[in-house]
Image (cartoon, rainbow, N blue to C red):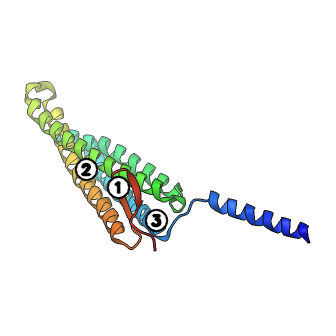
Amino acid sequence: MYNKVAISILVLCLAISNAQSQPLVSKSVLKFNRERKNIGTASMSVLGGYALGNMVACIPNAINLSGRDKYFNEMNVYWNVVNLGIAIGGLIGNDRKDFESLDLATTLKEQKQTLKIYGINAGLDVVYIGSGLALMNFAHRAPKAEDRLYAYGESILLQGGFLLLYDSAMLIIHAAHLKKAQKREGGLSFSERGMGLKYEF
C-alpha cells in the first residue's frame, strides 16, 4: 500500500514538474501570434507580387528598348530581384516558424523588433528617394553616362517611393495590431521595464 502511495506521489511530482517546465501560452497570446503570422504572410505576398509584376513587365522592355527607357526598366529588374528574394525568404521563414509556441515575453520582444525594423526601413526608403533625385540631378555632369544615370535615378526614386509606402503601411498595421491586442481583456502591453499582461482572465 505504501509503495502504491509513494509511486502515486512520484508520478504526481513528475507531472507537476513537467507542466512547470512547459511555457504557458495564454489564449490572448496565441490569438495575437496567429494574427501576426497572417499579417507577415500577407505582407510578404504583397512585396513578392509587386516584385514579380515589375519583373514580368520590365524584362522585355530592358531587352528590347534603348536609351533611358532601357536603363529605367533594367534598374527596375535589378531592384525587384532583391525584393523577390526578400519576399520568398520571408514567406519560407514565416511558414516554418512555430508562432503558437511563443510565450508572452518572446512575442512582445519580436513585435517590438518588427516595429523597429519597419521604422528603420522607412528611414532607408527616404534615403533611396533622395539618392534617386541626386542621381538624376548629377546625370548631366557625366554626358557619356547621362542617360543611364538619369534613368537609374528615376527607377530608384520610383522603387524607393513604393517601399516607403509599403514599409509605412506595415508599420501602421503592426502598431495597430498591437494596440488592438492591448485593448482586449487580458491583452498584451509594453511597460518601461519590458513586457507584461495588463490583466489575465
Q: Do the residues labelled 2 and 3 touch (CB within 8 Å)?
A: no
Q: Mark 2 points at which residue?
A: 163
Q: Name the residue located 24 percent from the left edge and 41 percent from the top edge.
A: 124
Mark closer to the chain start, 2 or 1: 2
> Within 10 angstroms of label 3, few (less than 14), some, or many (20 or more) residues?
many
Local crowd at mark 1 within 10 Å, few (<14), some, or many (≥20)? Answer: few
Residue 65 shows in the view: no
Q: Which residue in the protein does label 3 denote?
A: 29
Mark-to-mark CA distance, 1 and 3: 16 Å
What amino acid type should be assigned to the residue bearing mark 2?
A: Leu
Residue 13: quadrant of the picture:
bottom right
Question: Circles 2 and 1: CB distance less than 8 Å?
Answer: no
Residue 54 visible in this rendered orientation of the protein: yes
Label 2 sits on a secondary structure element that is helix
Q: Position of residue 40 (x, y in %)?
A: 40, 59
Q: What residue type is labelled 3?
A: Val
Question: In front here: 172 or 64?
Answer: 172
Q: Which residue matches tag 1?
A: 191
Q: In this view, does 132 lie above or below 48?
A: above
Q: What residue type is labelled 1?
A: Ser
> Where does residue 68 sit, x and y in percent of width and height?
16, 39
Q: Is residue 107 above or below residue 160?
A: below
- Between label 2 and label 3, give the one nearer the viewer: 3
Helix, strand or loop under label 3: helix
Helix, strand or loop at mark 1: strand
Residue 198, compared with residue 159, is above or below; it is: below
State how far apart marks 2 and 1 are (Cα).
31 Å
Q: Position of residue 55 (x, y in %)?
A: 32, 50
Q: Distance between the residues labelled 2 and 3?
A: 30 Å
